[in-house]
């Protein structure tokens, strides 16, 4: 990693993760009340805060009409944002770091997940003595370039392997992901809940990497590692600060509601089809996912640096990138939401 990158990482710590900016004024009516939001696999528990915000009417409370476009993976929703077909995205924080490195000013405004909540499982019967055995495998991910792919790249890099040492196959979010391993199309899977719990319970995989918990996240990364966020272009933020604040308010209220709600309350709030015809399975997956959700909506600056370090481990472009991590997260909106939302 070059000195410029290290300097940027240290700047992020000193600035506590927020870009220097003027304080926001009192929340006002959204400039753009109709919003198109992209997501890569809405039924996944990684994106549960989005579903809860929608189902509980928290967007409407903020004067927003949100149309959700569900893509096959996070990389696809990012592409849609860059292409201008959607306004905002719920997706992995790491995309903001990668896009800053490419000169595209995309920023998170509220954290939804503080741990990746991704687990890597190896198909039953497949020889596996350690990460080096991933070499030559066909590994299922939600979509190439998505967070499930990036985490797998990091796992392999720690074992001295490169992304080219395995074949990555996009298998989508829930039903298509389950089918891929059940049909023998893949040897391993890097995925999210409820897919992982379903395959674990049926004995079809053995989990070998687990970031659904703080312990598992620290074992892999050596510290925290933020996951799902709401991210937006700086141009949108500058043009629509009240709309951005309204979105942050809705998600902040969601996080607080989820902290107080029981597993049964949450299961009752999601669409019936998300339960996969097995409510007990969904409750199991939910119980394993709950530690991963953000408590404050604020990204830990050490987590920001952890994400940057992860990307430089396997991405040659990132090793030489000059990324100012303070530009990857605008903390004003989450902080203001904590004041506005009661």
Image (cartoon, helix red, strand yellow):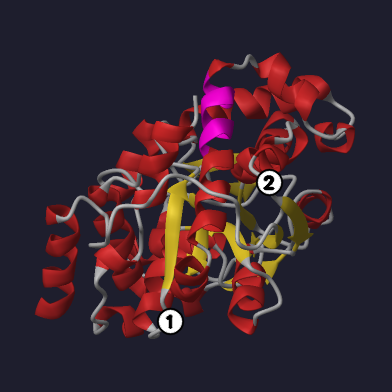
Q: CA distance from mark 2 to mark 1?
A: 29 Å
Whole-percent x and y of residue 102?
Answer: 40, 85
The part of the image, by quadrant, that contains residue 104 is: bottom left
In this figure, which residue is indicated by the disc labeled 1?
Answer: 104
In this figure, which residue is indicated by the disc labeled 2?
Answer: 63
The part of the image, by quadrant, that contains residue 138 is: bottom right
Camera-near label (2 vs 1) is 2
Q: Is 73 left, or right, of 274 in this rendering?
A: left
Q: Is residue 196 above or below residue 261?
A: below
Indicate which disc, 2 or 1, sits on the residue closer to the N terminus. 2
Number of residues whose C-alpha sits closer than 10 Å to that of mark 2, classed few (under 14), some (14–19) or many (20 or more): some
Q: Determine the residue positioned at 13% across, 79% down.
A: 4
Q: Secondary structure at mark 1?
A: loop
Q: Is residue 296 above or below residue 301?
A: above
Q: Give the total of numbered labels.
A: 2
Q: Determine the residue positioned at 82% across, 56% down.
A: 176
Whole-percent x and y of residue 162?
Answer: 41, 75
Whether residue 45 is visible, yes or no, is no
- Residue range highlighted in magenta: 252-259
Chief SS of the magenta region: helix
Q: Is 310 left, or right, of 14 in this rendering?
A: right
Whole-percent x and y of residue 224?
Answer: 31, 43
């Amino acid at each position: 990693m070059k000195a410029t990158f290290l300097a940027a990482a240290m700047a992020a710590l000193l600035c506590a993760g927020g870009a220097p900016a003027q304080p926001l004024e009192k929340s006002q009516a959204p400039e753009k009340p109709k919003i198109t939001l992209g997501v890569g696999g809405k039924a996944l528990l990684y994106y549960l805060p989005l579903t809860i915000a929608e189902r509980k009417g928290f967007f409407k409370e903020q004067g927003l009409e949100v149309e959700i476009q569900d893509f096959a993976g996070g990389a696809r929703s990012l592409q849609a944002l860059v292409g201008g077909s959607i306004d905002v995205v719920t997706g992995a924080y790491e995309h903001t770091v990668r896009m800053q490195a490419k000169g595209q000013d995309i920023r998170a405004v509220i954290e939804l997940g503080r741990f990746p909540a991704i687990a890597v499982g190896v198909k039953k019967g497949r020889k596996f003595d350690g990460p080096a055995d991933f070499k030559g495998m066909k590994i299922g991910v939600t979509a190439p370039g998505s967070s499930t792919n990036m985490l797998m790249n990091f796992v392999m890099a720690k074992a001295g392997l490169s992304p080219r040492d395995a074949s990555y196959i996009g298998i989508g979010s829930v039903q298509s992901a389950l089918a891929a391993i059940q049909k023998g199309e893949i040897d391993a899977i890097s995925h999210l809940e409820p897919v992982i719990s379903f395959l674990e319970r049926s004995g079809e995989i053995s989990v070998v990497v687990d970031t659904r918990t703080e312990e598992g996240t620290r074992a892999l990364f050596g510290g925290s590692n933020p996951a799902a966020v709401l991210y937006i272009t700086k141009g949108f933020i500058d043009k629509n600060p009240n709309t951005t604040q309204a979105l942050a308010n809705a998600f902040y209220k969601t996080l607080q509601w989820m902290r107080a709600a029981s597993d049964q309350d949450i299961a009752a709030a999601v669409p019936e089809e998300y339960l996969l015809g097995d409510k007990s399975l969904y409750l199991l997956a939910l119980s394993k996912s709950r530690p991963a959700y953000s408590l404050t909506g604020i990204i830990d600056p050490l987590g920001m640096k952890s994400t940057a370090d992860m990307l430089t481990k396997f991405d040659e472009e990132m090793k030489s990138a000059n990324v100012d991590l303070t530009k990857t997260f605008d903390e004003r909106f989450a902080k203001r939401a904590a004041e506005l939302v009661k």
